[in-house]
Amino acid sequence: DQQVKQNSPSLSVQEGRISILNCDYTNSMFDYFLWYKKYPAEGPTFLISISSIKDKNEDGRFTVFLNKSAKHLSLHIVPSQPGDSAVYFCAAFPGSGNQFYFGTGTSLTVIP
Amino acid sequence: GAVVSQHPSWVICKSGTSVKIECRSLDFQATTMFWYRQFPKQSLMLMATSNEGSKATYEQGVEKDKFLINHASLTLSTLTVTSAHPEDSSFYICSAREGTASGGHQYFGPGTRLTVT
């Protein structure tokens, strides 16, 4: 049962434009959300996170938006750069225990 | 930032043999480490949670006798795939949590690509 879903397996964006990656979840107990970036044959690296008490968190070119009523979060990258090309995973944490629930990933390609 | 290493990064083994994968936190102590498995184009699936000095906690559907986990120190956890079969071929990733707080950041290793022939 996939509790965190990324419905777009891939996304292509021109350099300099905005990249928007989407993530939906089903478990209302999730209260902490994270985005990870992953290059091929490497482990994921933490990018940005957001607590459920917020609806927006910004860090440089990266902004994460959370819509709790819709159980939806998105990652905005602006301006997009070729080095941003990677697979992006969203992950959710239910507030207790150890398990992070990962989405299936979205492969972003930024075209120079 | 915190660094987690894995060794080997890539291993090929014959069916029926066992393979050990090491996960080390290089600049911090990790009381809890996690082992994930990723199939192509699929999400990371948590296999087990490894706690230093105690038995690992396995997720439902993961065979504990097949995937042996040892967390002997605060900086090292090992995953041994016993009697490997071709269907065990996958990308195995470990992560380590800094500190003891639940929900604290997990730092991921670079992963190990296992191919069983």
Image: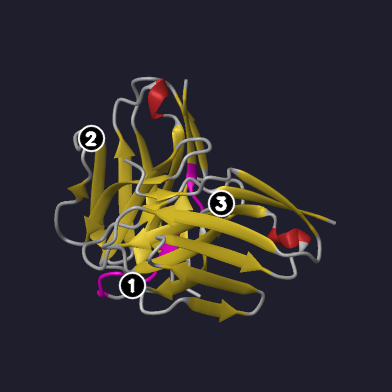
Task: Measuring from the top left, give residue B89's x and y in whole percent.
Answer: 44, 29
- Both on one chain, marks 1 and 3? no
Task: Measuring from the top left, give residue A70's x and y in whole percent.
Answer: 41, 61
Q: Quadrant of residue B4?
A: bottom left
Q: What is the three-letter code of the residue carrying label 3?
A: Glu
Q: Which mark is residue B8?
A: none
Q: Which residues are magenta?
A: B100-112
User: Could you tell me which residue is drawn at 39 percent across and 67 percent down?
Assistant: A68
Q: Is residue A48 magenta?
A: no
Dot 2 falls on which chain? Answer: B
Q: Is residue B99 above or below residue A2?
A: below
Q: Which mark is residue B104?
A: 1
Cα separation between marks 3 and 2: 25 Å
User: Could you tell me which residue is drawn at 40 percent across and 60 percent down?
Assistant: A71
Q: Which residue is mark 3?
A: A42
Is residue B40 at all visible to an observer of this figure?
yes
User: Could you tell me which residue is drawn at 23 percent across and 35 percent down?
Assistant: B61
Badge 1 crowding class, 10 Å Cα cut-off, few under 14, some 14 to 19, many 20 or more, is few
Q: Quadrant of residue B32?
A: bottom left
Q: Which residue is mark 2?
A: B61
Dot 1 falls on which chain? Answer: B
Task: Measuring from the top left, give residue B9's x and y in whole percent.
Answer: 52, 45
